[in-house]
Amino acid sequence: MTTDVRRVVALTVAYEIVRAGRTTEWLSERIGMPAHQLRKKLAMQLDFTVADLGEIADALDVTPSQLMPCVHDG
């Protein structure tokens, strides 16, 4: 992921956690990811994988596409 994409994805995931009224700890337990690893991804130190985003979307009741930035050709 580029730095910009990593930032947008991390901020979007963080927003959706808050919007759902959940915590990072709740999400890490729900998706089976160690909390320290999820925190690193939210801090933009590690990339989210497509599988991560699918599991997160399912846990937060959103679509995976809602967690990813729009990419326009131009």
Image (cartoon, rainbow, N blue to C red):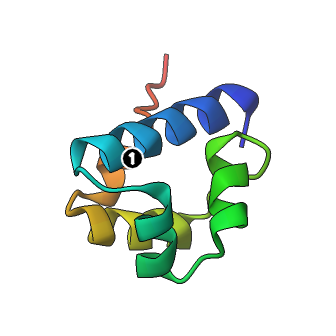
Residue for point 62% across, 63% down? 49
Q: Is 29 left, or right, of 47 in this rendering?
A: left
* Extreme-right residue of the structure: 45
* Residue 68 visible to an observer of this rendering: no
Res. 48 image quadrant = bottom right
Circle 1 packing at 10 Å, graded few (<14), some (14-19), many (20+), is: many
Q: Is 25 left, or right, of 36 in this rendering?
A: left
Residue under pointer 1: 67
Residue for point 53% across, 73% down? 51
* Extreme-bottom residue of the structure: 32
Residue 62 location (% of width, % of height): 22, 57
Q: Is residue 4 above or below residue 74?
A: below
Q: Is residue 63 above or below residue 13?
A: below
* Extreme-top residue of the structure: 74
Element at badge 1? helix
Q: Is 6 left, or right, of 20 in this rendering?
A: right
* Residue 56 visible to an observer of this rendering: yes
Q: Which kind of residue does numbered mark 1 sit on?
A: Leu
Q: Nearer the viewer, residue 6 or 35?
A: 35
Q: In which quarter of the image is the N terminus?
A: top right
Residue 26 location (% of width, % of height): 41, 68
Q: Is 69 left, or right, of 4 in this rendering?
A: left
Q: How many marks?
A: 1
Residue 17 location (% of width, % of height): 35, 49
Residue 24 location (% of width, % of height): 48, 57
Q: Is residue 54 above or below residue 41?
A: below
Residue for point 53% across, 31% down? 8
Res. 37 image quadrant = bottom right
